Image: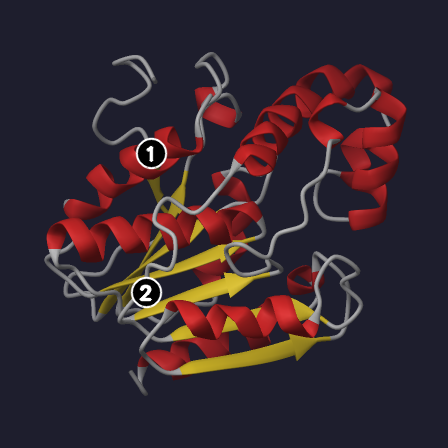
C-alpha cells in the first residue's frame, strides 16, 4: 500500500492546460519508466475547450523522493480518486504502453463502482488485457535492460547513453516493469460501455493483429484501430496527427 504522503490529494495529476468551460477532460497515462512531462508537447496541440492532465507516477520527476508503487492497484486506486474530482465534465483517457493498462483499469473502476462512463478510451502500443506478453526484464542485468530500452526508442534513450544517469533512470523502469509483469485484469471478462480507439506502430514487434483486435472484446461501444509508421514510440513522430484524430473522435462519441 502507498503511504499517506504518496496518496495525498492532488499528487497524481499534473494540469497541462486549463479551460473555463471544458468540453472534455483528457487524462494521459505514461508508459513504463515514463513521467507526466512526456505529455508536455500535447498542451500546444489540444483545442481550447479541452483540459489536459497527465498522471504523475511516484518515484520520478517532482515525486522523486516518494516510493515506487508496489502493486498495480496502487496506481489504479489513487488515480480513480483523482478522476472523481474531475467528473463534473466529460472524461476521456489516453494511455501509452503500460499506461494503457492503467487507463483501462481506472476506466473500469469508474464505470462499475461510480457509474461514470468515459467519452473515449484511447490505448496505444499495448495488447488487450489477457493478451500481454510477459517478460522478465525487471530483474534483467543493466546491459540487457539498456539494450531492450534502446531498441524501443523513446525519450529515455539519450539518458541511457550516459552511465552517470542510469542510476536515475533504471530504478523507475524496473519498478514499472515489475508492475507490468505481475499485472492481471482485476475482473476477468469485464466490459466497458465506452468507445475504444487503439493506436500502434506498424513496426511494433510485441503486438499482433490478434492482440490489438482483442480490445474490441472489452467494450460494448464503438471500436476502431489506426496504425502509424514506426515502432513502440511511433507517436513521437506523429503526434499532431494522433492528437487531431483523438479530437475528431470526441465529436463522434
Residue 149 badge: none
Cβ atoms at labels 2 and 1 below 8 Å apart: no
**With 24 as the anchor, is 230 left or right in this view?**
right
User: Which quarter shows the C terminus?
Assistant: bottom left
SS for dot 2: loop
Q: Quadrant of residue 229?
A: bottom right
Dot 1 crowding, Cα within 10 Å, few <14, some 14–19, many 20+:
many
Of callouts 2 and 1, which one flags the residue occurring earlier in the amino acid sequence? Answer: 1
- What is the tally of numbered marks visible in this picture? 2
SS for dot 1: loop
Residue at the disc numbered 2: 191
Q: Residue furthest front?
A: 188
Residue 216 lies, in percent from the top left, at 46, 75
Q: Nearer the viewer, mark 2 or mark 1?
A: 2
Residue at the disc numbered 1: 12
Residue 28 lies, in percent from the top left, at 42, 52
Is there any visible trace of residue 2 in the rendered image?
A: yes
Amino acid at each position: 500500500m502507498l503511504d499517506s504522503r504518496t496518496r495525498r490529494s492532488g499528487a497524481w495529476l499534473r494540469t497541462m492546460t486549463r479551460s473555463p468551460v471544458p468540453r472534455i477532460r483528457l487524462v494521459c497515462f505514461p508508459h513504463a519508466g515514463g513521467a507526466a512531462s512526456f505529455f508536455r508537447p500535447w498542451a500546444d496541440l489540444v483545442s481550447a475547450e479541452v483540459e489536459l492532465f497527465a498522471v504523475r507516477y511516484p518515484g520520478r520527476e517532482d515525486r522523486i523522493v516518494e516510493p515506487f508503487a508496489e502493486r498495480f492497484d496502487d496506481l489504479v486506486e489513487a488515480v480513480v480518486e483523482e478522476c472523481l474530482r474531475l467528473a463534473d465534465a466529460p472524461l476521456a483517457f489516453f494511455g501509452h504502453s503500460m499506461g494503457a493498462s492503467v487507463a483501462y483499469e481506472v476506466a473500469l473502476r469508474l464505470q462499475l463502482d461510480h457509474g461514470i462512463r468515459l467519452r473515449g478510451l484511447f490505448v496505444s502500443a499495448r495488447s488487450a488485457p489477457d493478451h500481454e506478453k510477459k517478460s522478465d526484464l525487471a530483474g534483467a542485468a543493466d546491459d540487457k535492460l539498456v539494450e531492450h530500452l534502446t531498441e524501443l526508442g523513446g525519450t529515455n534513450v539519450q539518458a541511457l547513453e550516459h552511465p552517470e544517469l542510469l542510476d536515475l533512470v533504471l530504478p523507475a523502469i524496473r519498478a514499472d516493469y515489475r508492475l507490468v509483469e505481475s499485472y492481471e485484469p482485476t475482473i476477468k471478462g469485464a466490459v466497458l460501455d465506452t468507445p475504444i480507439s487503439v493506436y500502434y506502430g506498424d513496426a511494433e514487434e510485441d503486438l499482433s493483429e490478434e492482440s490489438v483486435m482483442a480490445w474490441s472484446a472489452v467494450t460494448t461501444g464503438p471500436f476502431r484501430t489506426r496504425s502509424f509508421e514506426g515502432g513502440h514510440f511511433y507517436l513521437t513522430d506523429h503526434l499532431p496527427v494522433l492528437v487531431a484524430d483523438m479530437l475528431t473522435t470526441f465529436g463522434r462519441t
